[in-house]
Image (cartoon, grey):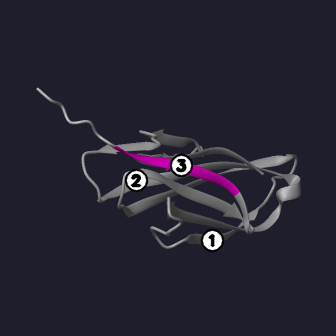
Amino acid sequence: MKVLLFTLCQAANIDIKNNLNILGAFDMITTTRVPIVYSSTLVLKLRFDKRDAGKKTFRISFIDADGKKLLPTLENAFFVTIPDGSSFCFMNFIHPIHKLPLNHFGNYSIDFSIDGALVWSFELIVAEARKNVT
């Protein structure tokens, strides 16, 4: 299995041709104050090979720099089916994130595991905006 894309964005959808459309991908939020509550969309594009076929369970955790969970962990089972005549398949995953609490400036992570093994960790940075001095 390969992670081809893992990002936060403003919005995303999958059209009828299974094209993944992403608007406003980011890995940093700049703000003048904390705490803030932020909403966005999590997007993943995965490639599975024949050896990956079968039942899988993914888990996504939202964690601050101290290891504290920010939201309940997302967990879901799914099946990887490789089409006849192919040696691989792609899967797109879109999940809205509502009211992510960001309580301090610094680094946060979104950890992605499949079948208990960490596959990817996305780093989100909350940076302090510089105030304009005139």
Crowding near the residue tagged with mark 1, few <14, some 14–19, many ≥20 C-alpha atoms within 10 Å: few
- Residue 12 lies, in percent from the top left, at 46, 47
Crowding near the residue tagged with mark 3, few <14, some 14–19, many ≥20 C-alpha atoms within 10 Å: some
On the picture, is 114 further left or further right than 107?
A: right
Residue type highlighted by circle 1:
Asn
- Residue 67 lies, in percent from the top left, at 53, 66
Residue annotated with mark 2: 40
Mark 3–mark 2 CB contact (< 8 Å)? no
| Start-end of magenta stretch | 119-127
Residue annotated with mark 1: 76
Q: CA distance from mark 3 to mark 1?
A: 22 Å
Residue 120 counted in the magenta span? yes
Residue annotated with mark 3: 123
> Between residues 100 and 31, which one lies in front from this camera angle?
31
- Residue 37 lies, in percent from the top left, at 31, 60
The C terminus lies in quadrant: top left
Q: CA distance from mark 3 to mark 2?
A: 15 Å
Dot 3 or dot 2: first in sequence order is: 2
